[in-house]
Image: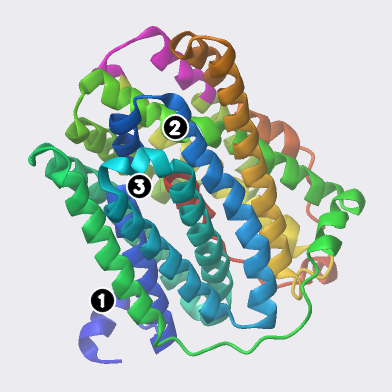
């Protein structure tokens, strides 16, 4: 490694595959943060109906876990790197399709959501597994820290920059511009993936065996229930809040500012929580974060102003790290002490994803059912009050989890890495 790079990263030996994976992850983060929030607004401006956006997101969350299962099987039977390339290729195809259909995108909302869900499924399964395989104990902290920095940078700069570009251009030109930029970044990511060394594969795909473990392993069952509960909030909140910000302000720049404040608070709090929350404080932190999130919902019920929404952005940007850092650590401690965790790490990641997206799908189906029976504007506050409790319920599912202290039991697997924290809020 040359002296220039070493002065930045410190005394860390970086190989080519690790740098390429970081490059792909960075391109993904910037591209998704730049455009993903505004796809919902793009569809809303064409259709003006919550159902159009709901079905778009429903397609994403149905196809994503299905693809995760397929990708998990292929990752063991074909090649992890090929699965990653498929993910980046489908994400490129998504933005290409958005550009091609243009002002007819709302008519193809389910098709677009399906393509995006497939892209997410292939990409995140491969990225999670490759992160584990490419990094070593001595490079893992650097990788996670630097990748977190890239995600935070994308979260702060992407939406605000996109909002500024859209607000300064006429008609749909701004949307075309940011979607084109995202497409370009993903094409570069596809090219970068061609240089990652292919990974040899071994073993059979035991999705069913790991799924059945929830009947034998109480801790694993509790984690899966908590994942479903997590998805309960995310499924509806992911698109409704963005639309509300846009409706109140009629400005994409204001939505970009909302995300800038959220990501800024999140960036600071992720750093603080990582430093301050110790293993014996995890469950308490999960409860506090979940309670803050649920109480914050009252702000958007009783106050109809952009200023209050910005306060809400700061609060949830603070609360999410308080939940996610200890919650994911606890979840992967459970996996690490579970049956055949080392050999079945892919299957554990896949099953976890299925339950998470199951909660998201249930949330959106509840939203569609309620808005079909009642006036959307009147029903939505009640829906948010119901699904908004999802993150608070996480605590009640995990509070009785006890990780084995016996070293032999705890050493059933190496640490498993996941990037679900940031992804869950930006998919």
Q: Earlier in the sequence, mark 3 or mark 1?
A: 1
Kindly identify which residue carries mark 1: 8
Tell me which secondary structure the magenta stretch mostly adopts: helix
Nearest the camera: 152 or 206?
206
In the rendered structure, find residue 371 and report the number of the disc placed on it.
none
Q: Residue at x 39, y 36 (%)?
A: 317
- Position of residue 15 measured from the top left corner of the image (x, y, whole percent): 41, 88
Q: Secondary structure at mark 2?
A: helix
User: Which quadrant of the view contains residue 308?
Assistant: top left
Kindly identify which residue carries mark 2: 52
Q: Which residues are magenta?
A: 294-308
Q: Residue at x 58, y 37 (%)?
A: 285
Q: Is residue 279 above or below residue 388?
A: below
The colour scheme is rainbow
Within the magenta stretch, is there residue 178?
no
Q: Is residue 234 at all visible to an observer of this figure?
A: yes
Residue 92 placement, left or right of 75: left
Kindly identify which residue carries mark 3: 36
User: Which quadrant of the view contains residue 126?
Assistant: bottom right
């Amino acid at each position: 490694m040359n002296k220039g790079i070493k002065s930045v990263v410190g005394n860390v030996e970086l190989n080519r595959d690790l740098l390429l994976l970081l490059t792909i992850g960075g391109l993904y983060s910037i591209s998704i943060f730049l455009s993903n929030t505004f796809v919902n607004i793009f569809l809303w401006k064409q259709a003006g109906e919550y159902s159009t956006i709901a079905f778009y997101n429903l397609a994403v969350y149905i196809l994503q876990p299905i693809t995760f299962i397929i990708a998990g099987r292929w990752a063991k039977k074909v090649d992890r790197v090929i699965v990653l390339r498929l993910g980046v290729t489908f994400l490129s195809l998504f933005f290409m399709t958005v550009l091609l259909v243009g002002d007819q995108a709302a008519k193809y909302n389910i098709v677009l959501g399906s393509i995006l869900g497939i892209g997410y499924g292939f990409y995140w399964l491969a990225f999670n597994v490759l992160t584990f395989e490419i990094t070593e104990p001595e490079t893992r902290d650097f990788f996670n820290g630097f990748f977190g920095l890239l995600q935070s940078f994308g979260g702060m700069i992407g939406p605000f920059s996109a909002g500024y570009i859209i607000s300064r251009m006429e008609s749909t030109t701004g949307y075309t511009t940011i979607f084109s930029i995202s497409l370009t970044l993903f094409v570069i990511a596809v090219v970068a993936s061609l240089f990652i060394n292919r990974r040899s594969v071994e073993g059979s795909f035991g999705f069913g065996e790991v799924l059945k473990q929830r009947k034998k392993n109480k801790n694993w069952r509790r984690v899966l229930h908590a994942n479903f509960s997590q998805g309960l909030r995310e499924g509806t909140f992911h698109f409704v809040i963005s639309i509300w910000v846009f409706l109140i302000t009629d400005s994409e720049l204001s939505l970009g500012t909302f995300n800038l404040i959220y990501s800024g608070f999140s960036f600071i709090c992720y750093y603080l929580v990582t430093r301050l929350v110790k293993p014996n404080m995890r469950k308490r932190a999960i409860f506090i974060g979940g309670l803050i999130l649920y109480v914050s919902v009252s702000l958007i019920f009783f106050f109809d102003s952009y200023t209050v929404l910005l306060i809400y952005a700061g609060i949830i940007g603070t609360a999410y790290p308080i939940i996610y850092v200890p919650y994911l650590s606890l979840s992967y401690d459970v996996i690490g002490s579970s049956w055949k965790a080392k050999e079945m790490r892919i299957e554990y990641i896949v099953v976890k994803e299925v339950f998470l997206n199951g909660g998201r799908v249930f949330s959106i189906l509840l939203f569609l059912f309620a808005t079909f029976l009642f006036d959307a504007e009147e029903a939505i506050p009640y829906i948010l009050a119901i699904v908004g409790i999802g993150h608070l319920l996480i605590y009640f599912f995990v509070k009785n989890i006890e990780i084995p202290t016996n070293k032999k039991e705890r050493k059933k697997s190496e640490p498993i890495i996941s990037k679900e924290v940031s992804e869950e809020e930006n998919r």
